[in-house]
Image: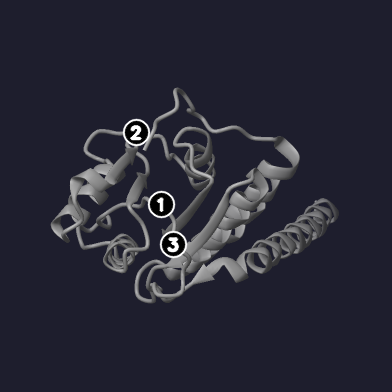
Amino acid sequence: MFTILRKIFKWTFYLACVIALIGSICFFWVEKSAEKSLYDNSSQVPSCKTALVLGTSAHLANGTANLYFTYRIDAAVKLYEAKKVKKFILSGDNRVNDYNEPKDMKKALIKRGVPDSCLVLDYAGLRTFDSMVRCKEIFGQDSVIVVSQQFHNARSVFIANKIGLTAFGFNAQKVTTQKTFKMKFREFFSRIKCVLDLYVFNTKPRHLGDKISI
């Protein structure tokens, strides 16, 4: 019995090492390939017709404001006030009742003074990969400013580079007080999946559909 447990532990350890190595390669590949396309200052980011704001929940499970959402809205408003974009694609998830990321973003941006006429809702942005591909294939954009936190923008730009979409990331303020470890852990595996989707599985978005002119 002890011998079997020892073998299980040994192979589990080897598997963990392989995952850690592959994950580290994917993580730094994504980071390095996108770093020159990410901006912290709205005055420096190149102008585009459209910005793509990536969705997340407006509130945490305990009802408090989700700072990832709040800071992305702040960043989108900065782009609008700097006249860097004319339109916003608000891309997110709305698969369950009483949860609608695009509508929450729209409501928040209108409250901050962005006109409704500038806002286009993408309800099929179920994940970052889908949002990026749909930006090009459904909404017909050949260049875009992606609005999210730096780690998320890096992955988004990495996807864009592979699918032939010129993308610049405008980094929303970094969150240091909410779910930071969970986000870092999740991002580690998200980058592995991102590389597999693009270079191994040839993954397609869950929903495409008719083209939408903006």
- Between the residue at mark 1 and the residue at mark 3, the CA separation in whole angstroms equals 7 Å
Residue drawn at 32 percent across, 37 percent down: 94
90 to the left or right of 63: right
Query: Observer-nearest residue: 12 or 82?
Result: 82
Label 2's element? loop
The image position of residue 182, as x and y in percent, is 47, 63
Asked whether the beta carbons under mark 3 and mark 2 sit within 8 Å of each other, the answer is no
Who is closer to the viewer here, 51 or 3?
51
Q: Quadrant of the C terminus?
A: top left
Please tell me which residue is depicted at 26% across the width and 54% down the height of the picture.
58
Q: Considering only order in the chain, which callout, 2 or 3, is on the residue closer to the N terminus? A: 3
Q: Which element type, helix, strand or loop, lies under badge 3?
A: loop
At 46% across and 23% down in the image, what residue appears?
209
Residue 111 on image: x %, y %? 14, 57
Question: Dots 1 and 3: beta carbons under 8 Å?
Answer: no
Q: Quadrant of residue 59?
A: bottom left
Distance between the alpha carbons at the discs numbered 1 and 2: 28 Å
Give above or below for 164 relative to 155: above
Mark 3, residue position = 47
